[in-house]
Image (cartoon, rainbow, N blue to C red):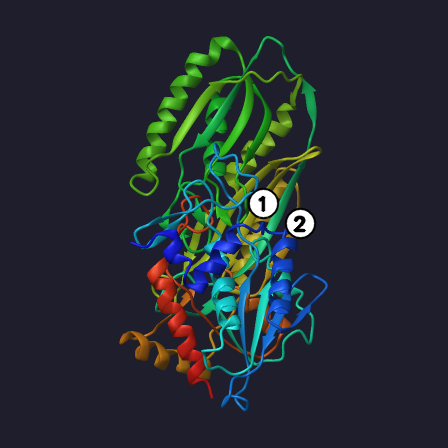
Amino acid sequence: MKDINTLLENRIFYYFDKLTKIPRCSFEEEKIREYLIGFAKEHNLEYKTDKIGNVVIIKEATKGYEDVDSIILQGHMDMVCEKTPECIIDFSKDAIKYEIEGDFIVAHDTTLGADNGIAIAMILALLESKEYKHPKIEALFTVNEESGMTGAANLEGGMVTSKRLLNLDSETEGVGCISCAGAERDLIKFKKEFKKLDKEKTLYEVIVNGLKGGHSGQEIQVGLGNAVKILGRSLYRIFEQVSGDLIEIEGGAKPNAIPRYAKAIVAVKEEDIKKIQDIIVELNSQFVTELGKVDPDVRLNFERTKVNLEKAFTDELKNKIIGLLNILPNGVIAMSKNIHGLVETSVNVGVIEDKEESINIISNIRSSVQSSKEYIGLVNKIAANSFGAEIEIMTKYPAWEYKENSPLREVAKKAYKEVSGKEFKLEAIHAGLECGMFVETIGDIDMLSIGPNMKGVHAPGEHLSISSTERVFDFLIRILEELK
């Protein structure tokens, strides 16, 4: 087991530690961008930026590789900023606290940011070093991958010139990603309408917590509990049997993270409390049974609240919100007919927001089949319209389709065999990678995605394997050496 001081002697983890101290939530990448530009200046490396905030740092070829075609090494600057309800971290200024537990770097109360900070750390360690052999490198660091891939989607022409790209945003050692799903993110809005709150009613919170959460692409097939959907189901059961009002509702944090927490404030008559408590007990039993060992700590709580409020949503709006939450598709829709075990199409009802003038629901659709993605978008539209809500597409991106001929893939297979003695596996994933965007913004390009072992990305408790990171870095160096 390594202690932190020993770990930081490795330049990869030296830079990763630096990144844990730099704010870099999606849409808030100013500090990490400044750091990267400062790094380029310190090491006398050429750099470029574009209007959306992407950064490219260029390192010329080492001796003997001057005539070898250049390569893009790519990762994204932002991270999913998730924390436990009791954690008081301010992601805009506080460092991520992590510990070393055996072979893992772990953040218990927050996300770790290994997705995709470890890519940045490996690339910086490579760029500063003079001991590795490689062709010309264009290190591309994109913004806002986690909330729409707008950096990759708006990459300006001329920022990079290479026709091969190695993305370092995968999460399983020894497995190269060769294809990924496309996605659409739908925003559904209910305009708020209020009525005066009956003073004879008492305010309670209905809370869903204890869920694991996780990546809505790579872990959607696990069957993890979705707090927003569970809350909608619970509210329907409660208001089906008792008269009451809905005052506030919110849940989830990121559209691409399976929501771990959701809550609503309701107003009910004291005479109905016992009946509601019985419903809560029954629902808890059902949820624990349904989620089994997958999400065993699910809890539905019903608690008195001290907030003092004077208005509630109209009955019509209450029924529309709860009805739509129950109707919206969620989870795995279809498995691939061509690749065994691969999810083809899925949906994650990731967020419900209580805004000043509207209640917003965000649904994240993924599919490796364009027509299926469009169809689920149509289902969302029909459902939203049926309940009187507005719907708009926030963002969408294409799938990265499998390429029959990939010289980069062949080099990687050979290099992995040499450094590990094992065969390099290839897979398509049910998650979005920026590679899909690069097909449009860069053009015809040979791509592969690799990365070290990680667990629990997008949720508190995120793990990064130390030894796997070291091995993947060696693998990366061998790929660069083998390029021709």
Query: Which residue type carries mark 2?
Result: Glu
**Which is in the foreground here, disc 2 or disc 1?**
1
The alpha-carbon separation of the residues under discs 2 and 1 comes to 10 Å
| Dot 1 crowding, Cα within 10 Å, few <14, some 14–19, many 20+ | many
Residue 405: tell me if it is visible: no
Closest to the observer: 333 or 419?
419
Specify the quadrant of the image occupied by residue 472.
Answer: bottom left
Q: Secondary structure at mark 1?
A: strand
Q: Position of residue 158 (x, y in %)?
A: 68, 76
Q: Does residue 255 lie above or below 236 as drawn? A: below
Specify the quadrant of the image occupied by residue 309.
Answer: top right
Q: Are marks 2 and 1 in contact (CB under 8 Å)?
A: no
| Dot 2 crowding, Cα within 10 Å, few <14, some 14–19, many 20+ | few
Give the residue drawn at x 46%, y 13%.
273
Quadrant position of the N terminus in the picture: bottom left
Q: Does residue 55 lie above or below 412 as drawn? A: above
Residue 439: tell me if it is visible: yes
Q: Position of residue 61 (x, y in %)?
A: 54, 83
Q: Which residue is mark 1?
A: 362
Q: Secondary structure at mark 2?
A: strand
Closest to the observer: 112 or 269?
112
> Earlier along the polypeptide chain: callout 2 or callout 1?
1
* Left or right position of 337 against 235: left
Give the residue drawn at x 62%, y 75%.
442
Q: Which residue is mark 2?
A: 392
Q: Position of residue 171 (x, y in %)?
A: 41, 61
Query: Which residue type carries mark 1?
Result: Ile
Q: Residue furthest left?
A: 421
Q: Position of residue 188 (x, y in %)?
A: 63, 43
